[in-house]
Image: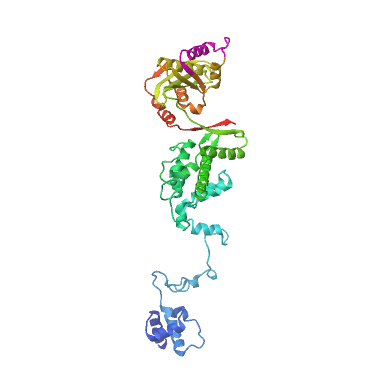
Amino acid sequence: MNQALLAKIGWRLLQREQGRWAQVLNAKYLRRCDILAAKDLQFQGSSNVWNGILHGAQVLSAGVKWRVGSGDDILFWTDRWLSCGPLQQFALIDLSEDMLQLNPTSNGQFSVKTAYSTFYLDEGSAKWKWDFIWKLHVPPKVKTFLWLLCHKKLLTNARRLKRKLTNVADCPRCVCPLESCAHLFKNCTATLAIWNRLGFGRVEAGQLMDDYDDWLLHNLNSRRFVVHGLPWYLVFIIFLWFIWKWRCKVVFDQNFLLPADPHLMIYQYAFEWFSACNPMAILPERSVVLLHWMAHLLGVCKVNTDGSRINSSGLIRAGGLLRDSCGNWIKVFSVNLGYGSVIKDELWGIFWGLSMAWDAGFRTVEIECDATSAVALLKSPIVSTHPLFSIINCCKMKIHEDWCCFVKHIFREQNCVADALAVKCYDFAPGLHVFLEAPAFLSDVLAADVRGAVRPRLVSV
Ligand SMILES: [Zn+2]
């Protein structure tokens, strides 16, 4: 009975009564625990009162059970919160000391990698999306730069302002008030001017994508090749690298002048790295030039022609078009020539181009063709025994009419419209076809020529 009465005092302590007696007992004996946890502890010099309360607490521990709420006050192993009593008595092994651990680690040891992934990369499945950067075949310093760029860690003015390294966040190369990574590499007008000269096209490169990360991933994972096996992703990375280099020069070197042909420097750097890594892929003594179709002076009619031959069947076709000095379309033709030899298709294309320019009333004409040998035949003395004597002679007679007529060789990259025509005219019936309106399949390539779209070509130096 006495123990039960003493247990009542213990119960009141458990209920956190705030009387002076309770404050004294709590302060003296229960600083770190409650009466149930303290019942087994022997306090040296404890008063008889306290020893009596502890005696009563033994009754309490048999009859008290926690109702689980937040769990903040319950000790999992030692408190009674199940009707079967403390769980500790059912443990199958000795309970070892509680220890802190960092998870997840492979060996239980602290690692910087684990700490970094735990504290900084907490974006779920997206957190490793840039890992592929380390496997790219690009110079190591560029790889590190790219890693920082993709994680938006480069010290652009927006970031420098955040770190109080500068007072302005403006773009140093245009009027934009915030120089972020997305602005610097994707949207800045100074960057776009260089980008357009690379000649890859804004649509192909996802330039119209709003999201900066999507744009980066789109280009870095591109499997397209720009010229002679040079992968686009490499040109793109070198482009980013140079944009950053030149941007820093603009900021920190007042005497810096952007190179006259920045796009060529980018291509050249990419080629040098690519040829060093792939010595069999390209010849080292070559370099890249960017080519585009060029309009002529006012009043001059420019005629582009091209031929096409299917080697397996021997079928030949030719096509061409007449344009004015602004690149406006005047007339398009294609001719299905049946069977024939190489060069014959090119010569027939030139012949029909000359004929149409003459018939249209032009008296200053420049013919452009991407077949070197065909142009050479027309510029050298004719040999009567040549198997193509007839068509060569017809062309020469046209050239020497009473007008100003030039025949010139250009590269295929400058002759894309005629090339597209020559290939397309396999769909047409035998004979000559003249188009009064520009065919729909030519609209994209015609527009590209008018705006001066460039195309890279590897040439011997
Ligand atoms: Zn800018």
Q: Up-down: is 295 above or below 219?
A: above
Please state which of residues 303 and 170 is positioned toward the viewer in this rendering: 170
Q: Up-down: is 110 above or below 67?
A: above
The reply to whether the magenta stretch includes residue 203 is no
The reply to whether the magenta stretch includes residue 394 is yes
Q: Which residues are magenta?
A: 381-405
**Quadrant the N terminus occupies:** bottom left
Q: Is residue 26 visible?
A: yes
Residue at x-position 50% and y-position 58%? 118
Please state which of residues 325 and 421 is positioned toward the viewer in this rendering: 325
Q: Is residue 315 visible?
A: no
**Quadrant the C terminus occupies:** top right
Q: Residue 17 placed where, x, y %?
A: 37, 81
Q: Residue furthest bottom?
A: 48
Q: Residue 356 placed where, x, y %?
A: 42, 16
Residue 438 is drawn in which quadrant? top left
Classify residue 359 as left or right of residue 271: left
Please state which of residues 307 and 24 is positioned toward the viewer in this rendering: 307
